[in-house]
Image: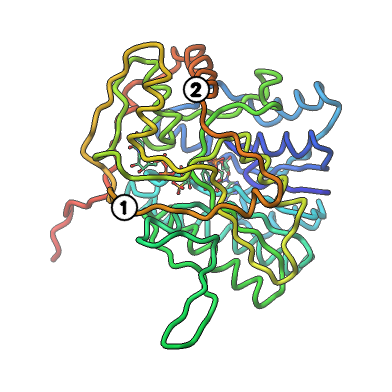
């Protein structure tokens, strides 16, 4: 298949592009390097050094003889998006290219507006381009488990069968997201479902849980193929952060009492899920949703698991929660769709955590300790006196 990976310079997009190329697909990536820009803005960097995209692509070609194409540009520029899609003629488009950090979207008004504009407008441009260039193209879009929030009922895969006053219907599962970033994904899901319904395009929305890990078989072949590994309080995700904190001898920063529970997935399963979704496309007009997670754990359990795997004594610290999120909630998620397509999950193991300890120790000298503590608060304090 010809597969275009939008956001192909990012933490997940890059390993996905390599994996799809490895299994024999014709791949191109697209990126505007916004993610590298957020690093400059926040004064942080990936713990693992990452090469410029052109160096990465050359290294892959040199090692495997396979080439991956590249389109450099912003999805919010419709001309770029249309020209890329008509030029590459993809069978599937994997769409990762969004601002993806909840804390970044909660910094202030400017960051919230940027996040929603970037994510919603970019996705709308992709939807229009598919509908007008070739409605057969399968859109594989990364959503997030956080679209659902933590409702007091079981979470289904995107759709809910309901009976109301004696009548039945199938509706999109109700959403209660926890940040302006997570909200941008809800807006995308609604736009994509609408596009499937009115234009008959085909889409798979993958509501992915928190990803952990840093290596796939492909990125592990050469240092030049490494993907990012974020540890800071804005872009670092919980399990990766706890591993890095434990190696540095810092307390693990559990927000609140730690009973808040999240879906998790190993980065090796992420790339496999994308392959499965691409190779088994949704039908024309179908808005198909899978919950892309393999297990659920509370933040406290994640901290205890990392602490237990660590050879050194680890302190777990409970910080006042900078976010507004439920603790002590119900969390039972259906996630069978991707397993039915053939996913064989890697569940979190000591071996994986130990391999992350190795990577972290190698690059520990690159950590900026001041970036570890959370600074972005969800709650607002009045900063203006109204006139
Ligand atoms: P990332 O920030 O590392 O990668 C996203 C890439 O998209 C970046 O390289 C960025 O430069 C690019 N991009 C952003 N806006 C763009 C635009 N307008 N035009 C072109 N390129 C643009 O993020 P990631 O961790 O790889 O996540 C990828 C996707 O998966 C995101 O949509 C995210 O919401 C979703 N997701 C991530 C996780 C996780 O734990 N990392 C979990 C669930 C879902
Ligand atoms: N948390 C801590 N301590 C920390 C960091 C996080 O207790 O040091 C807690 C948070 O309060 C939250 C949970 O861990 O309850 C997850 O936080 P996170 O930063 O790992 O994940 P989140 O903000 O939800 O975002 C990440 C990705 C995002 C993706 C999402 C999947 O950045 O792109 O969409 O995971 S999900 O959470 O399923 O929506």
Q: Position of residue 119 (x, y in %)?
A: 52, 55
Name above or below for residue 253 compared with residue 376. Answer: above
User: Element under label 2?
Assistant: helix
* Residue 100, x across and y down, in percent: 49, 46
From the viewer's perspective, is 5 left or right of 65?
left
Residue that appears at 29% across and 22% down: 251
Mark 2 burial class by Cα count in 10 Å: few <14, some 14-19, many 20+: some
Q: Is residue 306 above or below residue 329?
A: above
Ligand 2 picture quarter: top left
Left or right: 372 in relation to 184: left
In front of the other: 108 or 233: 233
28 or 141: which is nearer to us?
141
Rendering coords of residue 161 (x, y %): 52, 73
Image quadrant occupied by the C terminus: bottom left
Seen at 66% across and 71% down, the residue is 196
Question: How far from the left and from the top, in percent, is residue 270?
Answer: 61, 41
The tag on residue 350 is 2
Residue where numbered disc 1 is placed: 329
Residue 329 drawn above or below residue 243 = below
Spot the residue most to the right.
65
Q: CA distance from mark 2 to mark 1?
A: 27 Å
247 is higher (above) or lower (below) than 76: above
């Amino acid at each position: 298949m010809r597969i275009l990976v939008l956001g192909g310079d990012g933490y997940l997009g890059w390993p996905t592009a390599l994996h799809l190329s490895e299994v024999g697909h014709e791949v191109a990536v697209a990126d505007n390097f916004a993610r590298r820009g957020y690093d400059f803005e926040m004064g942080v960097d990936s713990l693992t050094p990452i090469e410029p995209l052109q160096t990465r692509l050359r290294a892959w070609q040199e090692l495997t003889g396979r080439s991956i194409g590249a389109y450099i540009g912003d999805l919010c520029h419709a001309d770029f998006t249309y020209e890329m899609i008509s030029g590459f003629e993809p069978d599937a488009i994997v769409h990762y290219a969004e601002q993806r950090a909840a804390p970044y979207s909660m910094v202030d008004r400017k960051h919230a507006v940027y996040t929603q504009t970037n994510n919603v407008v970019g996705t709308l441009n992709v939807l229009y381009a598919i509908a007008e260039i070739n409605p057969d193209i399968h859109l594989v879009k990364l959503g997030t488990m956080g679209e659902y929030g933590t409702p007091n009922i079981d979470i289904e895969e995107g759709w809910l069968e309901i009976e109301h006053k004696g009548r039945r219907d199938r509706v999109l599962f109700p959403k209660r997201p926890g940040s302006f970033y997570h909200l941008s994904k809800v807006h995308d899901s609604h736009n994509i479902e609408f596009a499937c319904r009115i234009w008959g395009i085909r889409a798979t929305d993958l509501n992915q849980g928190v990803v952990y890990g840093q290596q796939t078989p492909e990125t592990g072949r050469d240092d030049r193929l490494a993907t990012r590994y974020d540890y800071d309080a804005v872009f670092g995700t919980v399990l990766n952060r706890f591993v890095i904190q434990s190696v540095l001898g810092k307390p693990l920063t559990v927000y609140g009492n730690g009973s808040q529970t999240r879906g998790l997935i190993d980065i090796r399963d992420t790339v496999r899920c994308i392959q499965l979704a691409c190779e088994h496309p949704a039908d024309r007009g179908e808005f198909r949703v899978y919950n892309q997670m393999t297990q659920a754990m509370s933040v406290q359990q994640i901290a205890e698991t990392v602490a237990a795997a660590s050879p050194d004594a680890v302190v777990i610290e409970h910080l006042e929660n900078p976010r507004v999120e439920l603790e002590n909630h119900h969390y039972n998620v259906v996630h069978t769709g991707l397993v039915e397509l053939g996913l064989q999950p890697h569940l979190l193991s000591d071996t994986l955590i130990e391999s992350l300890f190795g990577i972290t120790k190698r690059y520990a000298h690159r950590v900026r300790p001041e970036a570890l503590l959370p600074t972005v608060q969800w709650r607002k304090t009045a900063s203006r006196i109204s006139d």
